[in-house]
Every structure is written in C-alpha cells, then in structure tokens.
Image (cartoon, rainbow, N blue to C red):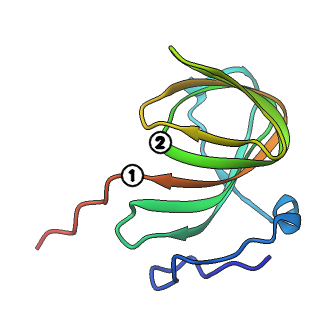
Amino acid sequence: MSTSDHSAAAPASFAVSVPDVPDTALEPEELDPAQVLSGNPAVTGKVLWESPDGSQVRGIWQITPGVVTDTEADELFVVVSGRATVEVEGGATLEVGPGSACVLREGDRTVWTVHETLRKVYQITSAPRPADGP
C-alpha cells in the first residue's frame, strides 16, 4: 500500500492503492457495548493521515456483522468490501456495498445492520481541536 506517514508532518496528499486496501492490517478499536443492538460486531481501523489540528482524519475502517447504533461525524466514505444497511434517523435508508460512495452528516443518528464484514476508506471533517493552553 502506498500511503504517507501518519505523523503531523506528513502532507495532506497521498495515494492508496485500492487493491491493497482489502488486505491492509488494521488495529482493534473499542466499540461501546451500549451501541450493540445485535450480534457480536468487532471494529478495526487504521488512520492513514490526520491534520495537525485534528480537523481532518483519513483512514480505513472495518466492522464485522451485527447491528450497531452510532452518532455520525461529517464523513465521506467509499465501501471497499462487504455490505450493510445504514438507517439514518428521520432520513434515508442506505444500502451500501463495494463501490458505494456515501456522505453522513455530523450528528446523524444511525443504525448500521452489517450483513457482510464491511471495510471502507473515509475522510472525517470536524472542528479543529483547541490549541494547548499555557
């Protein structure tokens, strides 16, 4: 896989070889048990780049089958493998699979029904973290 370093000094421009994404090793991520509605889903991920102020994060994320709730960030993602149904409270129901490009708005409350282990590449945008005080 061709990526830039995850350090703050890394440039914002980088390339990811899509054929390599399904095989990229990911690290376990914590999933709040209160979010799990059904099954025993496990979450893994890898941050590929994060802006120095924390306002942008780009990476790979995966979840195994099950049903979970989430409150979303401002996110653009593309599904690399797997399938899921994402129900947005008060909004659309998204059927996503390989090649689906999706946008979720910050604050959207969702229910993810993961039918097949889903892997996606994403970009999250948020307000910058406050600078450290004196």
| Label number found at residue 111 | none
| Label number found at residue 126 | 1
Q: Which is more N-terminal, label 2 or label 1?
A: 2
Instruction: Work out which quarter of the rendered image holds the C terminus and state it.
Output: bottom left
Whether tag 1 and tag 2 are in contact, CB under 8 A, the answer is yes
Across and down, in percent, residue 130 comes to 23, 61
The residue at the point 81 percent across, 47 percent down is 99
Residue type for callout 1? Ser
Q: Mark 2 = which residue? A: 73
The residue at the point 39 percent across, 73 percent down is 52
Across and down, in percent, residue 42 comes to 73, 40
Pick whichever, 95 or 22, lies toward us. Answer: 95
Q: Residues within 10 Å of mark 1 (few under 14, many from 20)?
A: some
Q: Residues within 10 Å of mark 2 (few under 14, many from 20)?
A: some
Across and down, in percent, residue 96 comes to 77, 34
The residue at the point 57 percent across, 78 percent down is 13
SS of the residue at dot 1? Answer: loop
Is 84 situated above or below 45? Answer: above
Residue type for callout 2? Ala
> Is residue 123 found left or right of 26 in the rendered image?
left
SS of the residue at dot 2? Answer: loop
Q: Residue furthest top?
A: 90
